[in-house]
Image (tube, coloured by chain):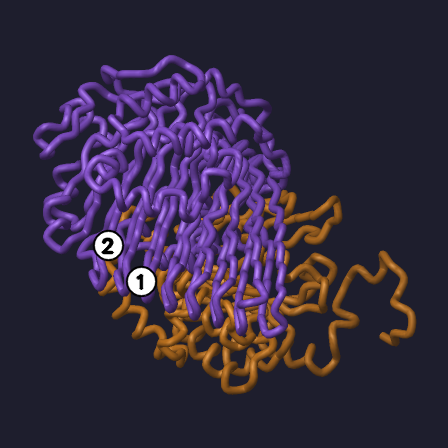
Amino acid sequence: MLRIENLRASIDEKLILRGVNLELPPGEVHAIMGPNGSGKSTLAHVLAGSGAYEVTGGVHYNDIDLLALSPEARAAAGVFLAFQHPMEIPGVGNLYFLRTALNSIRKLRGLDELGAVDFLAQAKEKMKLVEMDPSFMSRSVNEGFSGGEKKRNEILQMAILEPTLAILDETDSGLDIDALRVVANGVNARRGPDRAMLVITHHQRLLDYVVPDRVHVMVDGQIVTSGDGDLARDLEEHGYIGQGPLEADRPAPVGVVS
Amino acid sequence: MTVVPSEVRELAGQEYQYGFSTDLDTDVVPRGLSEDVITMISAKKNEPDWLLQWRLQAFRHWLTMEEPGWQNVDYGTLDYQDIIYYAAPKPKASVASLDEVDPEVREMFDKLGISLAEQERLSGVAVDAIVDSVSVATTASKRLAQVGVIFCSFSDAVQNHPDLVRTYLGSVVPYKDNFFATLNSAVFTDGSFCYIPKGVHCPMELSTYFRINTADTGQFERTLIVAEDQATVSYLEGCTAPMRDNHQLHAAVVELVAMEGAEIKYSTVQNWYPGDAEGKGGVYNFVTKRGKCAGANSKISWTQVETGSSITWKYPGVVLQGDNSVGEFYSVALSANHQQADTGTKMIHIGKNTRSTIVSKAISAGHGQNTYRGLVKVLRSAEGARNHTRCDSLLIGSECGAHTFPYIETKNSTAQVEHEASTSKVSEDQLFYCRQRGIAEEDATAMIVNGFCREVFKELPMEFAVEAQRLLDVSLEGSVG
């Protein structure tokens, strides 16, 4: 479903992704773990079409050259990014925003727009899934939401937009255990044979709920190790040290025993 | 990678859709300004002598005045002798019903999307349509007359209700008030007049639609609204002008008087021609608007959406004279391309426990410059006065500017005055967030801007809120790359 080949991305002439290779087959959930600053979020943003980076390499999504598409065209093609820091849009109602998003995507796909009544029925159903109070719908997009509410709102958006490729950028960070469970339920509900997910996380904790098919470890802008779920537990115990093949290229950090 | 960084680029210069001009047979006076021209205008309008004398007094005073230079807008020099001060579509005789309105004039308003006949029949809005200097049609007057509401052109009011006009003309904006108001007092040609008698709630929205058609004309209209004790009225004003290469001057005066317990709500959607993408042409909108809460417990509320004009320079204010009276000012001002806006309000607290609220939303795009300038003045007599001001600015792109000049003067220690201000940008992150959800960049920008203005739009009557939102979308088209 998703094939990433030698993907490089830089911002302000600083190279962040140094040749990422990854294969994500349909029906699978892959986790990407790695230390802060290793390029995980950059990978997520580049896949979603952020204009902030200079990008080379190849990203094939089904048979589409993903890098050639605008962010909105990628969304219409079924790519969804749950943001680590969802943006606030003052004065724009959450429900209105969601309906505009869904109808924009439907329009790009050549489908009829969904009327307000039909949409509301659908949204209410999905809100139950993420245990979200209906009052959130009339509030401005993410404005005054707590960290956990913002993350839940991302999952609600995912549930409504029904992507085939969902990228979750640290959706679990800052969540208490109840919120984590809600988020995980929302994510698991999206698993299916024709869909794939890329879950970026710092913590093994999420992977207890969302069990990945593969775990990749990213260090310094490259995938350095891949394995099954045990790899994540291993990392939780021992940290990322020793995972990178790049150590030969650079002096070991001072004070670190490997 | 083919997705280029979506830098916000210079405005592409949205086509102005009201830019046509209509070839009307028009009666004009010679260019320039003199006592003769004023006397001629007054004679054409068959005015009583006291009004001619008032005009001449204003003119003589105007000759002693200097054009102000403190504003944060830049417009070179105006040649007041090169303006046509009176232009009227012929025949100018006042019409008894819409059927008598010149078909070409009706067609012009149809083209503007304002069908005078339909307005009268369907929408429950009474319209006074003003072309250049003269009111060409007032709808629904008869229905309004049944409840005692007078809604007619200013000229008709001078003929039919001279005592009312004489009592209130200049009572809020005296002829010596300021350079442009004084000029208006000397040469004003038409406008709307509304009078709501005691205890009457005006049964429909009143609306004036202004149109500058003839080249090189100035439009100097004068609007006077009087609401007697416990009366209420909601009044709307809309404006357009043809696209012309040179600038047109619009120097109007609006006076509102609210007696005890009365409420006046005055809404403006201003869409004068803003000039082209290089800043050539466009209307200079230099307007004096002021309301007086003369009676206790009265309320005056200004709501304005200013998307047009090459320069907007105005401060709709309220003099809060009656005890417990309330003044409100809600404003959205957009400056795109090379548009400039210096706008805000004046709230003068005189009575006890008077309250005022100011909410200003300024949007700058392209090379637009937007200034909020507001005065909150609390006099010694205004025991317990309160004001709350919020000024928010939104920037789109890197070459526009937003400026805020709040003036606060209080002479009473019990007064509470609050001022909040913020400046934000439509950020790349916000746009990316929306686009990732499938919303195209222009739609996302329009959505963010409309969200920013929501607080003000919700103050507008429904039909106008929709119009204002659409206008904003159109004005911003092409403002992002």
Is residue B399 visible in the rendered image? The answer is yes
Q: Colour of chain B?
A: purple
Q: Is residue A46 visible?
A: no
Q: At which x and y percent is residue A254?
A: 91, 70
Q: Is residue B225 above or below residue A166?
A: above
Given residues A138 and A234, the one toward you in this image is A138
Mark 1 vs 2: CB contact within 8 A? yes
Q: Sequence order check: which comes first, mark 1 or mark 2?
A: 2
Q: Amino acid at mark 2?
A: Ile
Label 2 environment density (alpha carbons within 10 Å; few <14, some 14–19, many ≥20): many
Q: Nearer the viewer, residue B442 or A59?
A: B442
Q: Which residue is mark 1?
A: B262
The hue of chain A in the figure is orange
Q: Residue furthest top?
A: B30
Q: Which of the chains bears the disc numbered 2?
A: B
Residue A141 in the image: state x and y as whole percent.
Answer: 46, 65
Q: Secondary structure at mark 2?
A: strand
